[in-house]
Image (tube, helix red, strand yellow):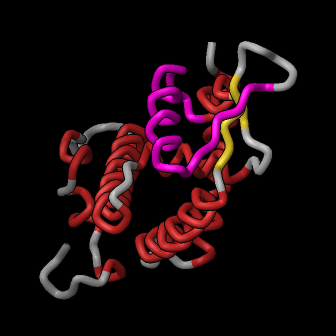
Amino acid sequence: MNDKSNDPSHATLSDAEELGHEARAGHDDHAVLKLWLRLLASTTQIEAEIRKRLRERFDISLARFDYMAQLYRYRDGLKMRVLSRYLMVTGGNVTGLTDELEREGVVLRAPSPEDRRAWIVSLTPKGRRSFEAMAAEHAQWIQEMFAGLDTKTVKQLHSQLGQLRVHVMRSEG
């Protein structure tokens, strides 16, 4: 940040360009390369701050938070295979997290009534309460980090990044 203020609304473009991944971009590089590096740098920076805050405030990893967030959305639980797909991690990762969270009493693992080989995982009442407390603070942190952007800009970025995702999805070969 510049030395005038710690307020993100006073940050300049040169402040942003000095940070992280963007330092790899040259002045002559194509605009989309610079954009890619800025997106990557922003995502990395926000994710690192969220990881830090989750660890400091709740002594929980981002992986555990994401796991609980998925289960929170599905009150009846999810098959572990589906949970693995939603989290984009291996089944072994989900099994390890499930074992830990089950020992802590925040998730329950039950056999699937339709498939004897599958397990359904759901949050316990303790797990739901715990996640709700974390999610409320998480939402405040995100709002705080994006406070330097006005509502119109946030909506425009959301729409434009949606268009980018659709384009990338269609061009995947």
Along the viewing direction, whichever of 102 and 26 lies nearer the viewer: 102
Vertical placement of residue 164 versus 82, above or below = below
Rendered-image quadrant of the N terminus = bottom left
> Is residue 147 found left or right of 29 in the rendered image?
right
Vertical placement of residue 90 versus 98, above or below = above
The reply to whether the magenta stretch includes residue 109 is yes
For residue 167, say whether it is visible.
Answer: no
**Residue 87 percent location from the top left of the image:** 56, 35
> Is residue 138 found left or right of 108 in the rendered image?
left
Rendered-image quadrant of the C terminus = top right
**Residue 60 percent location from the top left of the image:** 38, 54
Residue drawn where x is 22% and y is 64% of the image: 14
Residue drawn where x is 60% and y is 49% of the image: 161
Along the viewing direction, whichever of 43 and 111 lies nearer the viewer: 111
**Residue 92 percent location from the top left of the image:** 48, 20
Query: Residue 112 lies in what quarter of the image?
Result: top right
For the record, the magenta segment spans 87-112
Vertical placement of residue 32 versus 125, above or below = above
Number of numbered tags placed on the structure image: 0
> Is residue 83 found left or right of 145 in the rendered image?
right
Along the viewing direction, whichever of 53 and 78 lies nearer the viewer: 78
Residue reaching furthest to the left: 3
Vertical placement of residue 53 versus 102, above or below = below
The reply to whether the magenta stretch includes residue 74 is no
> Is residue 43 found left or right of 15 in the rendered image?
right
Residue reaching furthest to the right: 114
